[in-house]
Amino acid sequence: MENTQDTPSFVTPQGRRIAYHLTDGTGPAVVFLGGFKSDMGGTKAVHLEEWARASGRAFLRFDYSGHGESSGAFTDGCIGDWFEDAAAAIGLLAGKVILVGSSMGGWISLLVAKAMPEKVAGMVTIAAAPDFTEDSMWAGFTDAQKRELMAGQVALPSEYGEPYIITRRLIEEGRARLVLRDPLTLNFPARFLQGTADRDVEMSVALRLLDHASGSDMRLTLVDGADHRFSDEDCLDLIVSSVEDVLRRSARDTAPPT
């Protein structure tokens, strides 16, 4: 992540300090929501910011609490906290927004859409991981890991560096945030992107999301051979073109009749 000592920040209603970068431009603003233990300096977030600057589009990227430059410890956080951080960040923006959610950010985007439907003009998800604390983590734990977790926390190996410390609070609080058990209506253009070689989020998750959600303009794109990072040149181009498609479709849907 870039080293920026004067990164702007704000304090959420819950008292957490959230670092962010806001690019001025036309609306609806595009908001990038990052993944589990990632930060706003990642390849996809920065690439989208460069696109936004070049096209004159308003753009927001930020760090959840316990991530990147924001306050707090990662192990103190949970899905609900990070949703609240996202909702507060989106509250900085006037008008509607286009959400771009990567991995856990896809889950957070869906929570935002449920809680603040009046703010969302469209959505692009990248390897969305809704309900992963329950369907991937808890369901995949051995009995020994479940006992360890219930005693406080469990460490999981990660391909991205140090092991992930998974807390009991993360799992238990996540059960109040599940989005694939109840009706999920997306009344805006939604584009779901998924790599076939993703070892963190299986294709079945993307198919389940498409099947479970209801909406008049939803599309799933599978990219052969793309992994969870979804950050090579072709994948980055697809993210941008998907955002542009959602912007066009949302503008068409909200245009006054002629």
Image (cartoon, grey):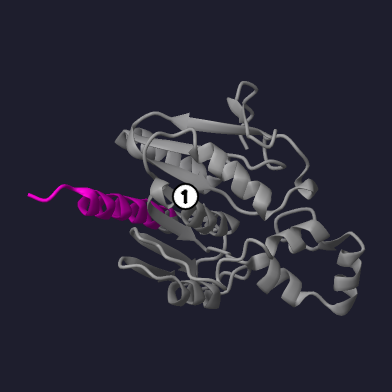
Horizontal and vertical percent for residue 65?
A: 68, 41
Looking at the rendered structure, the number of numbered marks drawn on it comes to: 1
Residue bearing the label numbered 1: 116
Chief SS of the magenta region: helix
Horizontal and vertical percent for residue 8?
A: 58, 25
102 is higher (above) or lower (below) than 60 = below
Q: Is residue 238 magenta?
A: yes
Query: What residue sits 46% from the left and 51% below the top?
Result: 100
Q: In this view, which residue lies farthest toward the left? A: 258
Horizontal and vertical percent for residue 32?
A: 49, 46
Q: Is residue 73 magenta?
A: no
Among the 4 quarters of the image, the one containing residue 124: bottom left
Res 180 visible: yes
Among the 4 quarters of the image, the one containing residue 27: top left
Give the camera-side residue of 98 and 182.
182
Query: What residue sits 54% from the left and 73% below the top?
Result: 205
Q: In this view, which residue lies farthest toward the top? A: 6
Query: What residue sits 56% from the left and 44% below the top?
Result: 86
What residue range appears in magenta?
236-258
Horizontal and vertical percent for residue 40?
A: 58, 41
